[in-house]
Image: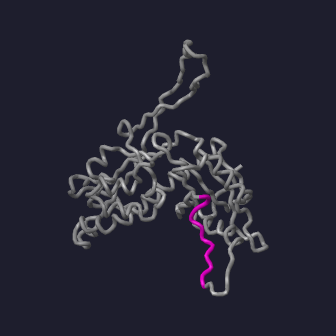
Amino acid sequence: MLPSSFYELAIEFAKKQTGMVDQFTEDAPILASLPMEASTHGLQNVYEEIVNVDAAEQVDLDVTMPEINIETKLVQENLSKFGAIMTVGEDLAENFGGKAKYFAKRTPTFLRKTGMNMEYAILYNVLRSKAYANAKWTNAGGTANANYTMLIVRWMPGENMGLYDAKMFGSGKVFDIKKISGGNLYDIEKNSTKMLGYGQRFATYFGTQIANLNHLSAVMNIDLDDDGAGDYKYLPTEMMIDDALDDARAGAGTMIYCHPKVKRALGKYKSARLNIAVPDKNFSKAIDYWDDIPIITSRNFLKGTEGKVV
């Protein structure tokens, strides 16, 4: 059974920032659903990776048993820091009715964008990057710089997980927010102009651990442009998707991630099998699962602008 998702965990522990959590994950559905575990040592997570292990052997009765050797190595995964400083000039703050009202007004927009950036980092800097680097990907055939990616990952406790700093969540926060200069006026710079103003610092720590590459795969070079005959140029075939699921050893805890346009395009395989009767008023080719594996979409995938991967 998978542990709590980022959203569930944040709502449970960060009771002081419930509204902030909603804003943070509003446009980052993959981040919100990511299974999470506490790191072992604050900003570092240390785990044991099995390099080699002996198996039990068939032996005769009442004879000496062979000794099993398990070779392991310690691996460390560091959490990343996501942070920023928000400032406001003295006069603008006054027009807003004070610095507190200004920061409260601007924070939701900042949080949504931050959640989107964190999700993009998970998709491209971790999952897609590791799938490519370890030859865990299938080529859908796209040749131009107009491609999409589909990612498949099986989340498993202790292996492939999101990581959080228990100390920060234990203090009731997803984001640590501090007033700069004690909330007093200090010298800031806005649009290359120096002025007096106020500032707040936002920071959080987050990691994504992929310790088992056997449970990761991707389909790249998906080109959904018109091929000139009313079809997609390079949509992955059903066999390609099935093979990618096999490559990730899909099972409990597996997710398929893609852009909404890729998910809609996959509906082609459903529509080819639909039987429509005269009374039917709704034609739906939408698919939410592929062989019981949920498909989760995000607009934080690049929309048809990925370069060809070779």
Q: Is residue 104 left or right of residue 184?
A: right
Residue depicted at x 67% and y 83%: 277
Q: Residue 285 colored magenta?
A: yes
Q: Is residue 271 left or right of residue 70?
A: right
Main SS class of the magenta portion in the image:
loop
Rendering quarter of residue 285:
bottom right
Q: Is residue 114 left or right of residue 250?
A: left
Residue depicted at x 63% and y 87%: 279
Instruction: Give the answer, above or below, for where 155 lies relative to 120.
Output: above
Could you say which is closer to the camera, residue 60 or residue 280?
Answer: 60
What's drawn in magenta, residue-wise?
A: 281-291
Q: Is residue 137 left or right of residue 194?
A: right
Residue depicted at x 68% and y 74%: 274
Q: Position of residue 214 (x, y in %)?
A: 60, 41
Instruction: Give the answer, above or below, for where 24 lies relative to 66.
Output: below
Residue extending farthest to the front is 61
Q: Residue 289 colored magenta?
A: yes
Could you say which is closer to the camera, residue 234 or residue 179?
Answer: 234
Instruction: Give the answer, above or below, for where 62 lies relative to 282.
Output: above
Color encoding of the figure: one colour
Q: Position of residue 89 (x, y in %)?
A: 29, 64
Could you say which is closer to the camera, residue 189 or residue 99?
Answer: 99
Rendering quarter of residue 292:
bottom right
Residue depicted at x 51% and y 31%: 49
Residue extending farthest to the right is 229
Q: Position of residue 186 (x, y in %)?
A: 25, 56
Q: Position of residue 260 (x, y in %)?
A: 57, 66
